[in-house]
Amino acid sequence: MAKLKFQSPSGMHDVLPQDQIYFQKVYRVIEKMFDFYGFEKIDTPILESADLFSRTIGPNTDIVEKEMYILRTREGKEALALRPEGTAPIMRAYLEHGFNTFPQPVKLWYFGPFFRHERPQAGRYRQFWQFGCEVLGEKEPIVDAQTILVTLNILSELGINNTLVKINSIGDENCRGDYKKALVKFLKSQKASLCRDCLRRTKTNPLRVLDCKNEKCREALNEAPQIIDFLCNECHSHLKGVLEYLEELKVPYILDPFLVRGLDYYTKTVFEIGVSKNDEEEGEEVLAGGGRYDILSKVLGKTNVPSCGAAAGVERIVFLMRKRRMEGVYSPLSKVFIAQIGPLAKKKGLVIMEELRKAGIKAAESFSKDSLKMQLSRANKLNINVVVIIGQKEALRDVLIIRDMETGKQAEVGFKDMVKEIKKRLK
RNA sequence: GUGGGCGUAGCUCAACUGGCAGAGCGUCGCGCUGUGGCCGCGAAGGUUGGGAGUUCAAGCCUCCUCGCUCACCCCA
């Protein structure tokens, strides 16, 4: 295996048939849920201008500093990036197509692959699948609550119920600056207790220090100023609004003053939806995250488009579904198998398959095999109960044999009565 | 980028102190020429991830390298 000349690139892998049944289940659930809440689907290109991301996500973030796959076009004029996230492209599309002239808010959802050049590990890939939704052009806190609700409902529908919502507000351009100053001042006073990374972050991205996992840092942060105390009136009442709506919906949440997000465009509401790791393991895994990004549109254009969105990691969800042996995944099994013996019967087999297709009956076959033994064996492995057998003798007389694989009983049926007889047996 | 673990057949894994590379499952064939499951027999499938070194002898020891994996960082 390892001597194979080619294998999938590091951190990227094939979604095999046995994985597809879970991916399809996820897709079907989110499609239905988003549709119910009035979201419409959008696909944006896999490649976007690299600047789109560096300008919106922020030049000092890990994503932009070291995780983007960047390539140049043949003309060499433009740097394109494999999209590392979905929000900026959607805002780009919104502005590009003049969605601001539509009734607001515009509600969109997506499902597709994203790319970040990180060191792969459990639940973390270089090409990974996300679905998400965006509510664009609305500043009211009720859409924040609804965004969280939709995401929770999807997870619940997929059998993931032990979720935990963490929420916080990181303020906006009016109040975040004041908080940052206060925080930096505090961090400098704690220099001795902070880890090396946090010392660096104090300069580059002080908010990030808040969610350092290092114990010493956490202790040091106990006394840190909390952003909630610095929120301006607007941000404060916005947060209050979101929380009130969540309470009305009976969505349990934890107000986590240390929750921040790694992307610069966030304002006000930020949230994460995690699930506690099972049994033996401690800690929790984040399945989805999101927040409000009122300033993103101003980076890209003149229009002011206050918006809120959420994104979730499909592989992480599938991992949980698999672990919990989620039932009801899409099963592609056929109900009927067509077996043939001899060249004439082989031709008839093709015709039989067409008849079954027109009748809406999914049929399997091994037309390339000649031995009946082989064909029945295959039908057995496919767990098929009804096998249509046609041989030279039957083909000449316009009849076929229907075999019940459970009992082994066979009956001869006229070609014309085939569909009727099969339908009877499938009941 | 920094640490730890692991690379043997398609898959899951054996192989004592360094001593003829094996099993189960799967695939294909035969027993049974037009009848599946169970059983029996057989075949295919390996430069033990790659390279160098030590040795009479290396899957096993040493070094290098590649890959995978887990964790940190960060994030979905």
Image (cartoon, rainbow, N blue to C red):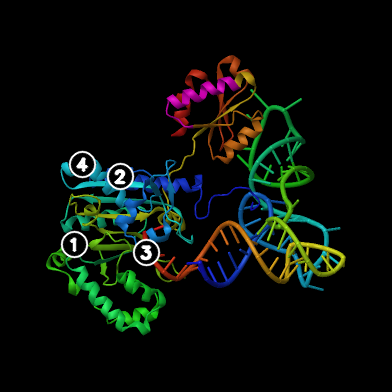
Taking the magenta stretch, the answer to whether it contains residue A349 is: yes
The chain that hosts pointer 1 is: A
Q: Nearer the viewer, mark 2 or mark 1?
A: 1
Provide the chain ID for the residue under circle 4.
A
Question: Marks 4 and 2: same chain?
Answer: yes
Q: Please, what secondary structure does the residue beneath circle 3 have? A: strand
- The tag earlier along the polypeptide, 4 or 2, is 2
Q: CA distance from mark 1 to mark 4?
A: 28 Å
Looking at numbered disc 2 in the image, what kind of residue is underneath it? Lys
Residue A32: image tag = 2
**Helix, strand or loop at disc 2?**
helix
Q: Is residue A177 visible?
A: yes
Q: Which residue is mark 4?
A: A98
In front here: A54 or A141?
A: A54
The subunit letter for the residue under badge 2 reads A
- Left or right: A7 with respect to A126? right
Q: Earlier in the sequence, mark 1 or mark 4?
A: 4
Label 4 to label 2, Cα distance in Å?
27 Å
Which chain letter matches label 3?
Answer: A
Dot 3 corresponds to which residue?
Answer: A275
Whether residue A356 appears in magenta in the rendering, the answer is yes
Q: Earlier in the sequence, mark 3 or mark 2?
A: 2
Q: Horizontal placement of A232 versus A350: left or right? A: left
